Image: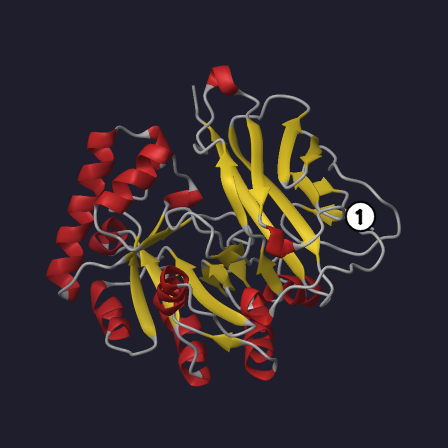
Amino acid sequence: MKHDCETGPVRPKATCRAGTLGLVLAFCTLSPVAAQVSEAELNKGANVLMYHRFGESDYPSTNVTLDQFEAQLEKLESGPYEVLALSEIVSALDSETPLPAHAVAISIDDAYRSVYTEAWPRLEAAGLPFTLFVATDVLDRETAPYMTWDELREMAESDLVTIGHQTASHPSMPQESLERNEEEIRRANARFKKELGQVPALFAYPYGESSTEVQELVANAGFTAAFGQHSGAVGVTLNRFNLPRFALNENYSDPERLDTILNALPLPVRDVTPANPLVSEEDNPPVAGFTVDEAAGPLDQLSCYSSGPDVKLETLERRIELRFDGPLAQGRTRLNCTLPIASGRWRWFGRQFLVPEN
């Protein structure tokens, strides 16, 4: 059996630690785990799903079919899952308030019109809250693939819908100047204020790309949290301005993967290095690492895998150091680390690195 950087862990019999080149990566489990964690620790996390398009089959990498989406909603309604507003999850993280054991949030990016015509009616019928992250320029252009301001206002009036911020023009923020990024946020703020009467409190980075400079800018702009597009469960120890989300699309929407991500738990990590997900030429490949809290239990079954070069794992007590076999390619590289625990669930920590264009 194989592992993809987006699908999550599976259960082959062999034992290994590093992935293969490309998207298909090996992941191997070991014998049953003896690690025990408290119920309070289990409840200090949640999983955030990320969608873009619905029933738009010309764009499979950002689309889910309507059959897939309806099956996913049925899973959320019929299982032990409790779907909460994303803002409620962020507030719980900030106060370190235990969340339900299977807390889930739904997020959607880019305000495609199929959100209004297909996703919203189904989510409304199911009574499930969600957050829609919007880049304002596309609404101003009033082009066919996107929603209109009238449609967004209609959705924003619902108690189930939270509008989030995704800049004005949806740029790759780490590859833009500080001044350009400040202007992007200011311009979008003005449009949100005029059209909706308020500025969103939650932010999502276009393409999931950020840097320490961008994260600091977003924090200083008054947002309460910001989200990337890397996999992983959100938890109290994570940077509030680089929180993970699990992407769903036509290729990554099978029931097995959905079960895995809905039951993921945060890996409680600290001292994450490098702090900056933007990789400079002189620091490529980056030397990645993190320290895992004692609450996570034994680390002998921790495995890490990459969407780029092979990665080797070194452990020194609670400190994990990761070494890429070669430099990261231009663009985005994702790194995922998972740890099975006694309950049959998985702790999951992920990162996304960006090597900028020349």
Residue found at x 50% / y 38%: 272
Dot 1, how many residues are within 10 Å of its Cα: few (below 14), some (14-19), or many (20+)? many
Q: Quadrant of the C terminus?
A: top left
Q: Is residue 122 above or below residue 221?
A: below
User: Which is more toward the observer, 268 or 121?
Assistant: 268
Residue 54 x, y percent position in the rendering: 48, 65
Query: Mark 1 sits on what residue?
Result: 28
Residue 8 drawn at (x, y percent): 67, 54
> Is 157 in front, or is 114?
157
Q: Residue at x 60, y 77 (%)?
A: 75
Q: Residue furthest right?
A: 13
Q: Residue sitting at 22 percent across and 33 percent down?
A: 180
Q: Is residue 102 positioned above or below 33 on the image? A: below
- Relative side of 175 to 316, left or right: left
Kindly state the secondary structure of the residue where label 1 is placed.
loop
Q: Residue furthest top?
A: 282
Amino acid type, mark 1 = Cys
Q: Is residue 20 above or below residue 104?
A: above
Question: Residue 119 is drawn in which quadrant?
Answer: bottom left
Q: Can residue 307 be seen?
A: no
Q: Is residue 218 visible?
A: yes
Q: Residue 274 at x, y = what percent? A: 49, 31
Would residue 200 be found to the left or right of residue 56 on screen?
left
Image height check: is 265 above or below 15? below
Splitting the image into 4 quarters, where does residue 139 fall? Answer: bottom left
